[in-house]
Image (tube, rainbow, N blue to C red):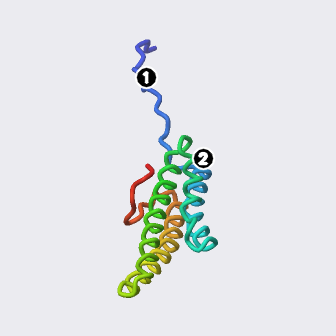
Amino acid sequence: MNTSASPQQPYTPHPQAGPNGEDRTAAVVAHLSAPIAAIVSAGWLSFVGPLIVWLIYKDRSPFVRTAAAQSFNYQITMWLTGIVGWILIFTIVLFPIGLLMLLVSSVMAIILGVWGAIRTAGGNQYRYPWNVPLLK
């Protein structure tokens, strides 16, 4: 009988495969709340949904916090672009540029918000192509 014991391996828990279902759902809500609010409020309140999700989950889930912050930052960027577009619309010379800015910011806020929700539903973090980094 062999009395010498082999050294035991330390216990290492299995790494998580990704965010759990609740985290993915909350992240999807953060991304989808922006386009839904944009449609309902004519684009003026698109940043409120992601901000609420960020406030609720900022200390509970890094995955949701990052998703909500990304969505909020992008929606604020599109919101500011829309305001600049509205200002330019009131000028005669810059009317076409203002109209283009307003249309592009509205359409991109909806399209990329939905795309972010689709990517996040799969457990991946979605980074918007450009935004003003206000929340982290």
Q: Check disc 1 and report the residue beneath it.
A: 8
x and y, in percent, of residue 108 in the image: 46, 74
In this rendered view, identify the residue nearer to me: 4 or 133: 133
Q: Write the residue at 35% across / 87% down.
A: 93
x and y, in percent, of residue 79 in the image: 48, 67
Furthest residue toward front: 91
Q: Amino acid at mark 2?
A: Ile
Residue 46 vs residue 126: left or right?
right
Q: Is residue 33 above or below residue 57?
A: below
Q: Write the residue at 42% across / 53% down.
A: 134
Q: Write the residue at 53% across / 70% down.
A: 114
Furthest residue toward left: 93
Q: Is residue 93 above or below residue 128?
A: below
Q: Check disc 2 and report the residue beneath it.
A: 56
Total numbered labels: 2
Callout 2 secondary element: helix
Q: Is residue 78 above or below residue 135?
A: below
- Classify mark 1: residues with Cα within 10 Å, few (<14), some (14-19) or many (20+): few
x and y, in percent, of residue 2 in the image: 43, 15
Of pointers 1 and 2, the one earlier in the residue sequence:
1
x and y, in percent, of residue 102 in the image: 46, 78
**Marks 1 and 2, how far apart at CA:** 42 Å
Q: Amino acid at mark 1?
A: Gln
